[in-house]
Image: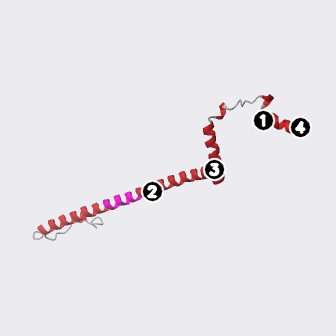
Amino acid sequence: RAHRWRVASAARGMLGVRHNVFRKAQSHPFLRYWWRRAMRFDERTGMLTAGIPLTITMVVTITLSTIMIDRQFELRDLRARTLSHREASLEEEHRAMREFLKGTEDEYEMKRIPDQFRAGGGR
């Protein structure tokens, strides 16, 4: 008999008043419905609590590693271009020097280097 009274009073509300005072604070019913469905989905699958952070981490990692690798290839290509440019300018200087030396071949003669310009200080 006492059990029935408790159930009946819970159905009627406090002091017999059937009104939920906190209903306004609980947001819109449509939003509550979808929130509960999302929570139930998350309890069953773990997609929201684990899947979303892992997806974000994966996308950020892939993006950053792609950018780093791209910068490394860009720097390697820049170094290769710089070296090839240096080699080309050196080759051009050698060719110009050969042309110059070919023109001076008939006037060329061996001369002694003065002692003050020799390695070792002219001893």
Q: Earlier in the sequence, mark 4 or mark 1?
A: 4
Spatial distance from mark 4 to mark 1, Cα to Cα?
A: 15 Å
What amino acid is found at the position of numbered circle 2 in the picture?
A: Thr
Spatial distance from mark 3 to mark 2, Cα to Cα?
A: 32 Å
For disc 4, the neighbor class at 10 Å (few under 14, some 14 to 19, many from 20) is few
Which residue is depicted at the point 65% across and 48% down?
40
Helix, strand or loop under label 3: helix
What amino acid is found at the position of numbered circle 4 in the picture?
A: Ala
Residue 94 in magenta stretch = no
For disc 3, the neighbor class at 10 Å (few under 14, some 14 to 19, many from 20) is some
Left or right: residue 103 versus residue 77 is: left
What's drawn in magenta, residue-wise? 71-81
Helix, strand or loop under label 4: helix
Helix, strand or loop under label 1: helix
Which residue is depicted at the point 66% across and 34% down?
26
Labels 3 & 2 near each other (Cβ < 8 A): no
Residue mark closest to the camera, 2 vs 1: 1
Q: Earlier in the sequence, mark 1 or mark 3?
A: 1
Question: To which residue does mark 4 refer?
Answer: 2
Q: Which of marks 4 and 3 is nearer the N terminus?
A: 4
Spatial distance from mark 2 to mark 1, Cα to Cα?
A: 61 Å
Question: To which residue does mark 2 refer?
Answer: 66
Name above or below for residue 113 compared with residue 25: below
Labels 2 & 1 near each other (Cβ < 8 A): no
Name above or below for residue 90 compared with residue 52: below
Tag of residue 11: 1
